[in-house]
């Protein structure tokens, strides 16, 4: 059945549409942190952050159905729901965040943020890290491609992402290392100023998720924000993966110590319904609206508002921020204990329920081992646990479960992790 479905998929979607695992899964149902395949086998989902309050969440499903059965129109009519949702959303941020542009995807939210910064500053240049990912439209994906083909993207430049595991300069203490990365950022600023593009913004995932969740040295993030603002630019925090209590706090930037001028959100906001947002102070948002006359047919709809409220209700009423922090701390401690006796686990790091386990070659100086990460993910699947790999070298086992993970699920995951360690080590 699965092989037949895969063949049909390749015809319908075209060969090359990606699937996880050597033997792809045919998933048919989800409940909380559990997924079930076509044969009825149960899996613990340690990967999917979009259904942040759980697969098949009853409150979200009921809110979605009730609103769709009542009214769903575009944003050119007054509607209480979207106004109260936007008010609630910006109130969760720091005091400088006042207004929102509601979209459907994180990519759209990033495009809005970049345009907002360019309009506000009158400059074109945007800075990102050299292992970033912020979306998949041509304008946004240029942020990633600029590291590989800088001449193709004169308005975008990159700098080495801040990390402690493989630092750009060895032998430095943590603050000196932060300063070394700040020097790299200063060089990126100079490139944009010399080119005539100037600095409109830097965009940073608050926890450097796609970079592999590196331990960011010292006060890099706060000083990076100061450096960009001194050059006349704005600071954009990409909270698509870091936000909505993924780290045990509402926003990743609270954890890594800076306040953005603009923040973008997506993925978990709608628990599966397309819902994203760009937030900033009112002046920035109104200037963007005035110069672009931005409109999104599906953005800022009553349906989005109803679901958005339901997701926040679930997070707040179930105390998920606290449980994420507690469970994440325990999981990292357990994985660090295993890493101490496994020569090919080079590092365990992360925040809350976003954890990376770095796979390296057992002999050598932290040589990334992508094949080991892929093998580990495959073997975990066979043990009934779903995960994937990420990071600059795709060698980091990425653990990013729904926020409703329970201690019993964590215990099952660790048992599966131990079984895979035994299988690989023989």
Image (spheres, rainbow, N blue to C red):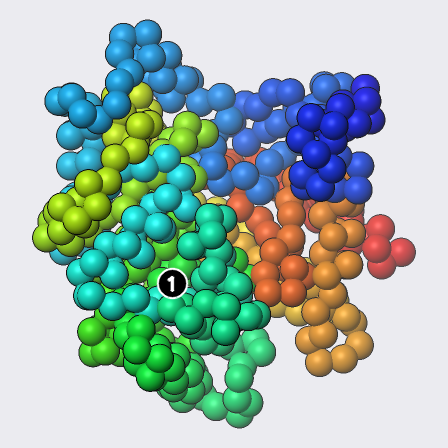
Horizontal and vertical percent for residue 15?
74, 37
Occupied quadrant, residue 362: bottom right
Q: Give the quarter of the figure containing the C terminus.
A: bottom right
Answer left or right for 199 relative to 174.
left
Q: Residue furthest left?
A: 283
Q: Residue at x 40, y 52 (%)?
A: 242
Answer left or right for 141 relative to 364.
left
Occupied quadrant, residue 194: bottom left
Q: Residue at x 71, y 41 (%)?
A: 16
Occupied quadrant, residue 222: bottom left
Horizontal and vertical percent for residue 28?
64, 20
Q: Which one is in front, 259 or 364? A: 259
> Mark 1: which secondary structure?
strand
Q: Residue at x 70, y 34 (%)?
A: 14
Q: Is residue 170 visible?
A: yes
Q: Is residue 333 visible?
A: no
Q: Give the quarter of the figure containing the N terminus.
A: top right
User: Which residue, given by chain and number where applicable, does mark 1 sit on?
Assistant: 204
- The correct choice, above or below, for 294 with respect to 329 in the image is above
Horizontal and vertical percent for residue 313?
29, 29
Please count the marks in the image: 1
- The correct choice, above or below, for 118 with respect to 56 in the image is below
Q: Residue furthest top?
A: 69
Horizontal and vertical percent for residue 12?
69, 26
For the residue carrying disc 1, how many other residues have a C-alpha within 10 Å: few (<14), some (14-19), or many (20+)?
many
Answer left or right for 287 relative to 55.
left
Q: Residue at x 37, y 44 (%)?
A: 108
Q: Residue furthest right?
A: 426
């Amino acid at each position: 059945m699965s092989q037949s479905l895969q063949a049909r998929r390749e015809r319908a979607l075209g060969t090359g549409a990606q699937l996880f695992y050597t033997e792809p899964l045919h998933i048919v149902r989800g409940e909380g942190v559990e997924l079930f395949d076509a044969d009825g086998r149960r899996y613990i989902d340690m990967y999917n952050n979009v259904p942040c309050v759980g697969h098949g969440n009853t409150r979200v499903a009921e809110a979605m159905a009730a609103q769709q059965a009542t009214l769903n129109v575009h944003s050119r009519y007054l509607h209480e729901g979207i106004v109260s949702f936007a008010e609630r959303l910006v109130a969760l941020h720091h005091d400088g965040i006042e207004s929102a542009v509601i979209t459907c995807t994180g990519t759209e939210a990033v495009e809005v943020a970049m345009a907002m910064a360019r309009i506000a500053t009158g400059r074109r240049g945007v800075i990102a890290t050299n292992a970033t990912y912020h979306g998949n439209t041509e304008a946004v994906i240029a942020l990633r491609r600029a590291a590989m083909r800088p001449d193709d993207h004169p308005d975008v430049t990159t700098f080495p992402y801040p990390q402690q595991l493989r630092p750009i300069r060895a032998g430095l203490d943590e603050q000196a290392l932060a300063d070394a990365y700040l020097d790299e950022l200063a060089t990126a600023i100079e490139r944009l100023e010399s080119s005539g593009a100037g600095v409109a913004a830097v965009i940073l995932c608050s926890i450097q998720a796609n970079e592999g969740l590196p331990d960011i040295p010292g006060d890099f993030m706060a000083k990076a924000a100061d450096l960009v603002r001194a050059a006349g630019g704005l600071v954009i925090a990409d909270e698509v993966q870091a936000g909505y209590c993924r780290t045990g706090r509402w926003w990743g930037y609270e954890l890594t110590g800076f306040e953005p001028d603009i923040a973008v959100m997506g993925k978990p906001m709608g628990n599966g319904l397309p819902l994203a947002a760009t937030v900033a102070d009112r002046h920035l948002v109104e200037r963007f609206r005035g110069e672009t006359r931005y409109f999104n047919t599906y953005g800022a709809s009553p349906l989005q508002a109803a679901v958005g409220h339901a997701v926040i209700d679930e997070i707040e009423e179930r105390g998920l921020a606290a449980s994420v922090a507690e469970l994440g701390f325990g999981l990292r401690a357990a994985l660090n204990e295993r890493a101490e006796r496994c020569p090919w686990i080079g590092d365990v790091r992360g925040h809350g329920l976003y954890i990376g386990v770095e796979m390296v070659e057992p002999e050598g100086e932290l040589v990334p081992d992508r094949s080991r990460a892929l093998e580990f993910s495959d073997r975990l699947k066979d043990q009934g646990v779903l995960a994937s790999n990420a990071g600059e070298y795709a060698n980091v086992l990425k653990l990013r479960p729904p926020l409703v993970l329970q201690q019993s699920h964590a215990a099952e995951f660790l048992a599966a992790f131990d079984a895979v360690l035994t299988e690989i080590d023989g």
